[in-house]
Image: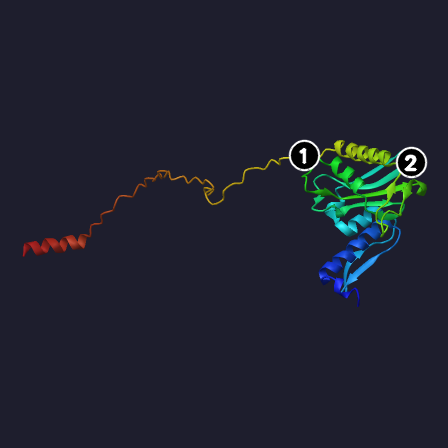
Amino acid sequence: PARLKHMKSLYTELASITDYMNKLSLSHPDIRFVLKNNDNIILRTDGSSNLLKVIQSIYGNDVTRKMIPVSGENADYEVSGYISLPEIHRSSRNNMVTIVNGRVVKNQEINRVINEAYHSYKPDNRYPITVLNIVVDPSVIDVNIHPTKMDIKFSKMDTLIELISEMIVQKISGRELIPKAFLKEEKPKEDKVFDKPKYTEQFINLDIKESKIEEVELPEEEIIINDDLGASMVSDDSL
């Protein structure tokens, strides 16, 4: 009850819990995590020790495709992890995750070095997505400088800064940041509305051939004289 008045809205508290679980899963990819809220799964990791799969569970496929693996080491430090392409950035530094010997820490100097390595590739008020895992001898760091143990002090900070800066700049400058654009040649579409109708040409021969009429010789009419009729005609005339 004493801390109830310090509780914020449900959305704010859920965002804080989700952020904490995200960083915990990034620092321990070998452990399976499941975060639910009202039967809705917010985060699920498989515990396969694959850091890139954890990044996919948190940020999605589009961001994961544009994450670059990085690694480097010197006499004191060993650094590995993933950094985003300059085209992927966020409005806050909260997505710049630094893990030291398996524990998430917040170090302003490391965040500054990472941001400066991107300075010529992104807007000034935007910040990349990075997950850097630093392995160092515990005798080189001091974990008692912050009450919540969130920040630590490096005794050889200069060598670590140089290592991180060179590693990021080399990876970004060595990649083709502007994607190639290919123009696809498309055949012009025929406007079917104004197409002339296609007719098949048919030829009709209208020439009329003169038909030959064969002349038929008709037989001459035979004149038959009836003698009896002629005699009767003569007798009538005599009357």
Disc ID at residue 96: none
- Circle 1: element type: loop
Residue most extreme to the left: 239
Three-letter amino acid code at disc 2? Answer: Asp
Mark 2 packing: few (<14 Cα in 10 Å), some, or many (20+)? few
Q: Are marks 2 and 1 in contact (CB under 8 Å)?
A: no
Across and down, in percent, residue 197 comes to 46, 43
Q: Earlier in the sequence, mark 2 or mark 1?
A: 2
* Residue positioned 86% across, 42% down in the render: 153
Across and down, in percent, residue 172 comes to 76, 34
Q: Quadrant of residue 40?
A: bottom right
Q: Nearer the viewer, residue 224 or 213?
A: 213
* Residue that carries the numbered disc 2 in the rendered image: 76
Q: Nearer the viewer, mark 2 or mark 1?
A: 2
Viewport quadrant of the C terminus: bottom left
Q: Quadrant of residue 101?
A: top right
Across and down, in percent, residue 46 comes to 85, 54
Q: Is residue 207 above or below residue 5?
A: above
Q: Nearer the viewer, residue 56 or 87?
A: 87
Query: Is 86 left, or right, of 99 in this rendering?
Result: left
Across and down, in percent, residue 125 comes to 68, 42
- Circle 2: element type: loop
Mark 1 packing: few (<14 Cα in 10 Å), some, or many (20+)? few
Three-letter amino acid code at disc 1? Answer: Lys
Give the spatial CA distance, label 2 vs label 1: 40 Å
* Residue positioned 84% across, 47% down in the render: 151
* Residue that carries the numbered disc 1 in the rendered image: 180
User: How are the colours assigned in the image?
Assistant: rainbow
Query: Is 59 left, or right, of 47 in this rendering?
Result: left
* Residue positioned 84% across, 56% down in the render: 33
Q: Nearer the viewer, residue 89 or 214?
A: 89
